[in-house]
Amino acid sequence: MWHYGHAAEIERRMIVLLERSMDFGEGPGPTAEMVTRGRERLARLYGMPMGLEPVPRLAATIDACRAYVGARVHAPDRALALLRSLRRRAHSDQQALDERETIAGAARDAGLDPELVDAWLADGEIEAQLRADMAATRDPLPEALALPYRLSRSATGLRYSTSSGVFEHNRCASSRPGFNRSPCTRSQWLTSHRASTGARRPRRSGRSWPGRHSRSPTAEVAELRGIELPTARAELERAGARFTASANDGYWAP
């Protein structure tokens, strides 16, 4: 989204993978081993900091999603920072998303009052918007349904998986279902096609920062700069960025 996102209006929708927490084996879903293997794969393929300790249960994600939708409505300038912190805490630090302290910590990271965020969790307007998000993610476009192996299954059928995208322009829509080996390249192609009125921005310079109000993993900086991980680490150190170790790598802050 860096190259063409300035010419697009971006709205992040919440899937809500789990409405209630459950023990492994309690119902259909991944096993603990499958979760660990998935994390290992993401760390290996993309260099992202992924916690690899066994998790005790499948944590509900619905309250974390409610918190983000609340920020999207009431504090849009802090919403992405909240979402990024929730992702970091869940995937790198392995904090459970069904625990209020995880959400409160992410709120503080994003510069939000945890009590205000907590109030959003019981807000009827926020609940309605969250349910609309869930319905949209469970209604894939026909072209996405033609690629069922890139979709996930839900109680009502096929749904978009994480890292999917729907691109709309002049009443036309196209989708990029699922996560693939080169997600950035595919997203750039679709965004440039739909946001055709905007010129492509160059790669980020060493002085610009990917995540406003948030920390960035080394792999993200390397991707946006078009450089290898060791080079990104060296550049960040020379720029005086502060590094916090997490999982197999860590995060940088200006």
Image (cartoon, rainbow, N blue to C red):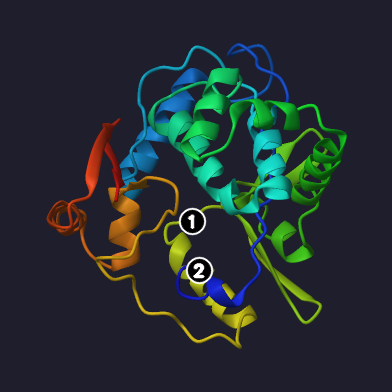
Q: Nearest to the eye among marks 1 and 2: give it.
A: 2
At numbered mark 1, what does the secondary structure look like: helix, strand or loop? Answer: loop
> Does 106 sit left or right of 170 as displayed?
left
Picture residue at 65% right of the left edge, 25% below the top: 115
Q: Is residue 50 above or below residue 238?
A: above
Tag 1: residue type?
A: Asn
Residue 248: in sight, yes or no? no
Identify the residue at horizontal 66%, vertical 69% (top origin): 9
Closer to us: 146 or 216? 216
Question: Residue 2: which numbered mark, if any?
Answer: none
Residue 13: percent from left, percent from top = 69, 50
Near-viewer residue (137 or 141): 137
Question: Would you place residue 192 above or below residue 1 in this image?
Answer: below
Q: Position of residue 144 (x, y in %)?
A: 70, 60
Q: For mark 1, what is the residue?
A: 180
Tell me if 96 is positioned left or right of 132 in this view.
left
Residue at (41% x, 26% y) in the render: 36
User: Residue at point 33% right, 61% down?
Assistant: 223
- Kindly indicate whether the residue at mark 2 contacts the one at mark 1 (C-beta within 8 angstroms): yes
The answer to whether one can see residue 165 in this image is: yes
Mark found first going from the N terminus, 1 or 2? 1
Q: Residues within 10 Å of mark 2 (few under 14, many from 20)?
A: few
Q: Nearer the viewer, residue 228 or 146?
A: 228
Which secondary structure, mark 2?
A: helix
- Rendered location of residue 98, percent (x, y): 61, 20
- Horizontal arrangement in the rendering, residue 20 relative to residue 4 (left or right): right
Q: Which residue is mark 2?
A: 186
Structural distance between the alpha carbons of marks 1 and 2: 9 Å
Question: Amino acid under label 2?
Answer: Arg
